[in-house]
Image (cartoon, grey):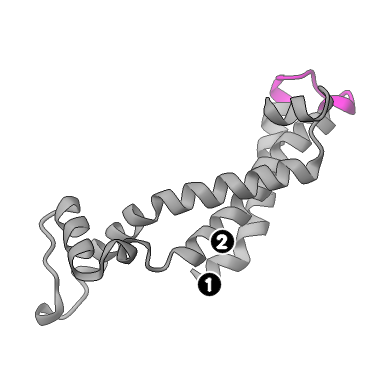
Amino acid sequence: KALTEMNDGKAIPLYQKALAGLAAGGLGALVGTPADLTLIRMQADSTLPPAERRNYKGVGDAFVRIVRDDGVAGLFRGAVPTVVRAMALNMGMLASNDQAKEMLVDAGLSEKGGTVSVMGGAFIAGFFASACSLPFDFVK
């Protein structure tokens, strides 16, 4: 709504949708990184040799021990590839979904909020989300 108001009620340009997707993806991934790190550590723990295992009792125990051993910054270890990948994925998904729905409606293929525009936008967004995030999946 704020972007629409900034554009005097006109459609939001693609570059603004892309920037909004980048921001949403980056912030969401940054907030979720501690939980993701904890999950990965708990899963990887069972694959370590018995002498190297951390033997976490649960999620809470893992959080506390990571902070105790590595500090609060330890919860964000590995955040950069996760954040960059999420930014690319969300940019591709959010911007292309909205743009595709607008284009389908403008082309007369669907009414606003109709099944064709919603499903078509979702299919197109899925493709672009995958295409934008795939290079970063190899890094993460």
Q: Could you say whether the residue bearing mark 2 is in a helix, strand or loop? A: helix
- Give the residue pinned by disc 1: 139
Whether the magenta-drawn stretch holds residue 114 is answered as yes
Q: Can residue 86 be seen here?
A: yes
Residue visible at 19% across and 70% down in the picture = 69
The region drawn magenta spans 105-116
- Distance between the alpha carbons at the discs numbered 1 and 2: 10 Å
Residue 9 located left or right of residue 80: right
Relative height, residue 99 to residue 109 (above, below): below
Estimate the x, y position of residue 41 in percent, counting from the top left: 26, 65
Estimate the x, y position of residue 84 in percent, counting from the top left: 56, 61
Q: Can residue 126 be seen here?
A: no
Q: Quadrant of residue 33?
A: bottom left
- Give the residue pinned by disc 2: 84
Amino acid marked by disc 2:
Val
Mark 2, other Cα within 10 Å: few <14 / some 14–19 / many ≥20: many
Give the residue at the far right of this rendering.
107
Relative height, residue 54 to residue 28 (above, below): below
Most common SS among magenta residues: loop
Amino acid marked by disc 1:
Val
Residue visible at 68% across and 28% down in the picture = 2
Residue 19 located left or right of residue 106: left
